[in-house]
Amino acid sequence: MLHDLDYYSSTTDALTLFETGSSNFLPRVFMYFDDIVGGDIWLSNDYTGQRLAIDEFNKKHELQKIYPNYYLMEEYRIPWFSSMIRI
């Protein structure tokens, strides 16, 4: 699932999709968030944008968590894999 949402508000709205019940999803859903790393101008942090929306989602949902896919980051060591996370 590709999330090209850019903003906190659009990310929180999109994440409500996962509140429809676990029977609608596979055990793991791989997601790519394009705006969680940033660059030399767009300096993302944990208190704004997509990262804040993900943190709030994790705090709100006891059994569903969005987190990095550490295997892909370690196995392939491609910079954009740091934006690959899963629920």
Image (tube, grey):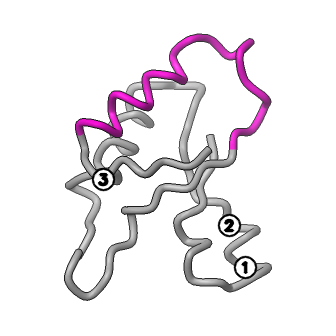
The residue at which mark 1 appears reads as: 74
The residue at which mark 2 appears reads as: 70
The residue at which mark 3 appears reads as: 6
Label 3 crowd (10 A; few <14 / some 14-19 / many >=20): some
Dot 3 falls on a residue whose secondary structure is loop
- Report the residue at 34% width, 53% height from top: 51
Looking at the rendered image, the disc whose residue lies closer to the viewer, 3 or 1, is 3
Label 2 crowd (10 A; few <14 / some 14-19 / many >=20): few
- Percent x, y of residue 79: 57, 83
Dot 1 falls on a residue whose secondary structure is helix
The amino acid type of the residue labelled 1 equals Glu
- Percent x, y of residue 19: 51, 16
The quarter of the displayed image where residue 65 is located? top right
Give left or right: position of 87 versus 37: right
What's drawn in magenta, residue-wise?
A: 9-29
First in residue order: circle 3 vs circle 1: 3
| Image vertical order of residue 77 relative to residue 7, above or below | below
- Report the residue at 44% width, 31% height from top: 15
Label 3 to label 1: alpha-carbon separation: 26 Å
Pointers 3 and 1 in contact (CB under 8 A)? no
- Report the residue at 38% width, 63% height from top: 36
- Percent x, y of residue 33: 48, 56
Pointers 1 and 2 in contact (CB under 8 A)? yes
Label 1 to label 2: alpha-carbon separation: 6 Å
Label 1 crowd (10 A; few <14 / some 14-19 / many >=20): few
